[in-house]
């Protein structure tokens, strides 16, 4: 399934399409590279937090969708949703032991991070995010380790389901790097009956494989898309589209 036009990124377990949005995007702004004029295609990508639940949701647009993978643009201030407990706290706000409760809900809000590009390489167990500083300058690559995405299509809504594996890598513009969130990763591995990551070695091996690419300065760490500028009309949508909270397929 190759898409063109707009996208929503929903980290927890799906990437979906909503054909009720406007917009014809030219140049790199239409799903498949070299395919223009397909309007109203929206996606989002979600991350499953175990037990088939949606963990959080972020809106974005499809920049390109080709043999290399899916490239998304997440606008600042986009509507989002994330899983919280009865006290309204997210998973990262409490020890994992305290997060193990049967009561959750999805709370809506706004993406308060910087605008960013997100690339899901075809078949890979990671995604790469291009972060920018407050002046809009490239600040580095964030490698999110995750299970390979699984695409699905409900007709008016379609997407890609992924599962976040928590351990990440930060790559600076000079291609120096460091592990991120390793403390959370190790903490959660101590609860194998509840934690969705079952192969610590495989997650670390994928991280090391991507680190080698970064150190070598090869795609996608070769400067590609570091100067990407979205069209002016690529503003954040007003709300999440109908169906954003559908159950994940994984």
Image (cartoon, rainbow, N blue to C red):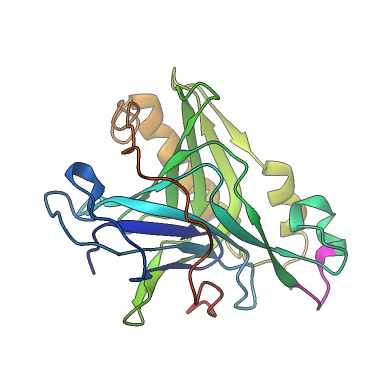
Give the answer, above or below, for where 69 lies relative to 149: above
> What is the quadrant of the N terminus in the image?
bottom left
- The residue at the point 62 percent across, 61 percent down is 81
> Which quadrant of the figure has residue 50?
bottom right
| Count of numbered tags | 0
Pick the residue in front: 229 or 123: 229
Where is residue 20? Give x, y as percent.
36, 70
Where is residue 117? Give x, y as percent.
41, 41
- The residue at the point 36 percent across, 82 percent down is 154
Left-right relation of 90 to 162: right
Left-right relation of 178 to 28: right
User: Any magenta on residue 177?
Assistant: no
Give the answer, above or below, for where 46 lies relative to 66: below
Q: Magenta: predominant secondary structure element?
A: loop
| Outermost residue, left side | 34
Left-right relation of 45 to 89: left
Where is residue 106? Give x, y as percent.
69, 69
Give the answer, above or below, for where 67 lies relative to 248: above
Pick the residue in front: 121 or 205: 121
Where is residue 88? Give x, y as percent.
82, 62
Give the magenta range: 99-104
Pick the residue in front: 145 or 70: 70
> Which quadrant of the figure has residue 35?
bottom left
Give the answer, above or below, for where 44 lies relative to 151: above
- The residue at the point 41 percent across, 39 percent down is 210
């Amino acid at each position: 399934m190759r898409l063109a036009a707009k996208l929503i990124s929903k980290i927890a377990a799906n990437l979906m399409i909503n054909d009720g949005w406007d917009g014809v995007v030219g140049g790199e702004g239409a799903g498949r590279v070299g395919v223009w004029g397909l309007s109203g295609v929206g996606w989002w990508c979600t991350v499953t937090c175990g037990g088939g639940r949606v963990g959080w949701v972020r809106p974005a647009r499809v920049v390109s969708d080709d043999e290399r993978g899916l490239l998304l643009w997440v606008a600042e201030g986009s509507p989002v949703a994330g899983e919280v407990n009865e006290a309204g706290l997210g998973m990262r706000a409490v020890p994992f032991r305290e997060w193990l409760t049967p009561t959750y809900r999805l709370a809506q809000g706004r993406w308060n991070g910087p605008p960013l590009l997100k690339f899901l390489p075809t078949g890979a167990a990671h995604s790469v995010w291009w972060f920018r500083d407050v002046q809009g300058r490239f600040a580095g690559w964030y490698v999110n380790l995750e299970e390979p995405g699984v695409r699905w299509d409900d007709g008016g809504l379609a997407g890609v389901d992924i599962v976040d594996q928590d351990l990440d890598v930060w790559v600076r513009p000079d291609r120096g790097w460091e592990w991120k969130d390793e403390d959370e990763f190790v903490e959660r591995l101590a609860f194998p009956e509840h934690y969705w990551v079952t192969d610590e070695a495989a997650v670390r091996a994928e991280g090391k494989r991507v680190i080698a690419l970064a150190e070598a300065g090869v795609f996608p760490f070769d400067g590609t898309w570091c100067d990407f500028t979205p069209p002016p009309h690529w503003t954040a949508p007003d709300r999440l589209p109908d169906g954003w909270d559908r159950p994940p397929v994984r």
